[in-house]
Image: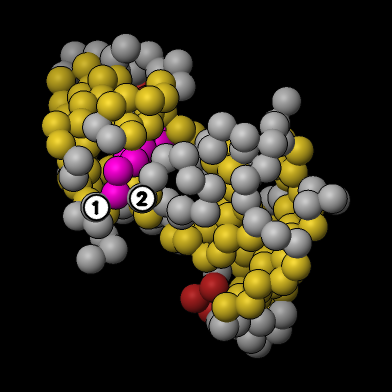
Amino acid sequence: GQNIDQPTEMTATEGAIVQINCTYQTSGFNGLFWYQQHAGEAPTFLSYNVLDGLEEKGRFSSFLSRSKGYSYLLLKELQMKDSASYLCAVRDSNYQLIWGAGTKLIIKP
Amino acid sequence: DTEVTQTPKHLVMGMTNKKSLKCEQHMGHRAMYWYKQKAKKPPELMFVYSYEKLSINESVPSRFSPECPNSSLLNLHLHALQPEDSALYLCASSQEASEAYHEQYFGPGTRLTVT
């Protein structure tokens, strides 16, 4: 079967750094996406990784290791507005997105 | 314009009602999607349209009926729903359905309550 695992919830402090991990087992791999979703709102695209390594985009970076079936999203200089759920999604061999359950990130002052 | 719009934002309907959800995008995307999302769960794919043709139906009950009148519009017709169908219904679009790197753009969703 297809499976994506993320921690259910994480807490971090404003100004700090947090790493949200995602492990996956899917039928094929055509890239991994990270989305941010604030409560009651639609998911918004953050990053896409298809090759191994780190992609940096401002305060957010995403890392992929295909051999380990592993990715992480790194958020630096945390702000209160970063409180949201972070969804990891893998595009499988049929080009369908397989979604993780999401990690709820709580930022404390 | 990188926006996907959905109407209505909120909908309350009885189990015998018929209603429709609407989605629109003007980004020239050729793939459009309907998702259902329950609280604290990830989006659950319902339907995929590619070039205005239904390409994926994820075994969705027939009380949900999708329609793609043209490349910019996507509807979801609802009839005889059950209370457990209450959820956030998200529409999304992407340039192509079968290209790996194209991200999906989501609309704000319709919060549906079935009474």
Residue closest to the eye, A53 or B38: A53
Residue closest to the eye, A43 or B38: A43
Tell me the quarter of the image containing the N terminus of chain B.
bottom left
Q: Could you tell me if the residues under marks 1 and 2 are in contact, i.e. CB atoms within 8 Å? A: yes
Q: Main secondary structure of the magenta part?
A: strand
**Residue depicted at 60% across the width and 82% down the height:** A59
**Residue A102 in view:** no
Task: Name the element at disc 2.
Answer: loop
**Residue depicted at 53% across the width and 48% down the height:** B100
**Residue depicted at 65% across the width and 56% down the height:** A50
Q: Looking at the rendered structure, which numbered label has been put on residue B95? A: 2
**Residue A35 in view:** yes
Position in image of residue B72 (x %, y %): 18, 45
Q: Is residue B57 left or right of residue A78?
A: left
As drawn, A76 above or below B77 = below
As drawn, B4 above or below A30 = below
Amino acid type at mark 1:
Gly
Q: Is residue A87 left or right of residue B48?
A: right
Residue behind mark 1: B28
